[in-house]
Amino acid sequence: MPGILRLWAVTVALADLMAGGASAAEPPKVVASITPVHSLVAGVMAGVGSPTLLLKGGASPHAYALKPSDARALASARLVFWIGEDMERFLERPLKTLARRARKIELIEAKGVTVLKQREGGVWGEHDSEKDGHAEKHGEENGHDAHVWLDPRNAKAMTASIVAALARADPGNAAAYRANGARLAAKLDTLDRELDGALAPVRGAPFIVFHDAFQYFERRYRLRAAGAITLDPGRTPGARRLAEIRKVIGARGARCVFAEPQFRPSLVATVIEGSGARAATLDPLGARLAPGPEAYFTLMRRLSTSLVGCLKGND
């Protein structure tokens, strides 16, 4: 009996030790703002934990109202990953009031992220996406374009920032975060090469976007956007603005006008009526995608497929 008791005591001690170790390595509660950010964070946390996504479905980050579940997630978060105030306007005040104890990582400020200035107006010159003067580091001036994730090189720099923040907050799982980050970086390099080849046939084809959300994608793959239907996605463009875009379609020979799932597609139908241009959809946020590590890659491939399909007339 004494031997059995000793064995039982050792077993209990080992179980307590293992439980203590598991508790020490428990991942922090993490919140991510939008699907592309959530996807990168989920990729880094794979096998360790799952981040909470705030903005789900087809909601726009320009005008989103927090739900009670969002407020609870922010209040209990240790880390919050977002692009920045120029993108997720709905988060500015909640981050100060609800997520006071959390570390906030503004990914547009991540080391290695190249930030482009917002283009002026809604009609652009043929080489606007190629001018070196549009690039700056870390958005040091006002009026920068916050859609930084649409260049895989930026996504790779953001991933490095995510890895560093998680490893610092959770040293017990740092090795897993770093290994996941390395795999994710390699996948982003492969994606970048894949998209470069897929988009090559439509590099010279002009098109119109709903709003100026795709500058990073255009610049990276040398595409030729001629203009945007609206300057502010939160406001419906007037008749004069729509007439201006119709003129651009004719003058520049734009083959396609792209809607976005977050906004009214009827505006695109109005603009292309009688023009011969085709209509399709580009989704910079992944509104209809299931959240998770693959969402970013699916989002980028769908942008490529939609552009190629419409501009080549294959959709």
Image (cartoon, rainbow, N blue to C red):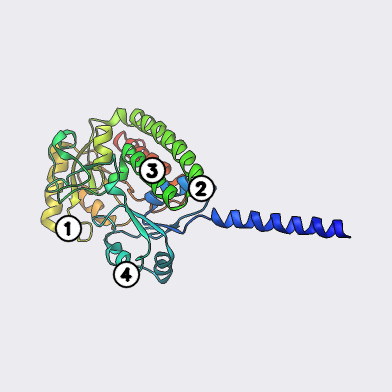
Label 1 sits on a secondary structure element that is loop
Label 4 sits on a secondary structure element that is helix
Q: Locate the N terminus and report the quarter of the image it occupies.
A: bottom right
Q: CA distance from mark 3 to mark 1?
A: 36 Å
Q: Which residue is at a point 70% across and 57% down the rendered structure image?
A: 13
Which label lies toward us, 1 or 4? Answer: 4
Q: Is residue 294 above or below residue 220?
A: below
Q: Is residue 293 visible?
A: no
Sort mark 1 into few (<14), some (14-19) or many (20+) by Cα contacts within 10 Å: some
Q: Residue 169 or 142: which is nearer the viewer?
A: 169
Sort mark 2 into few (<14), some (14-19) or many (20+) by Cα contacts within 10 Å: many
Q: Quadrant of residue 34?
A: bottom left
Callout 4–callout 2 Cβ contact below 8 Å: no
Q: Is residue 78 above or below residue 148?
A: below
Q: Which residue is at a point 43% across and 50% down the rendered structure image?
A: 166
Q: CA distance from mark 4 to mark 3?
A: 27 Å
Q: Earlier in the sequence, mark 3 or mark 1?
A: 3
Residue named by callout 2: 173
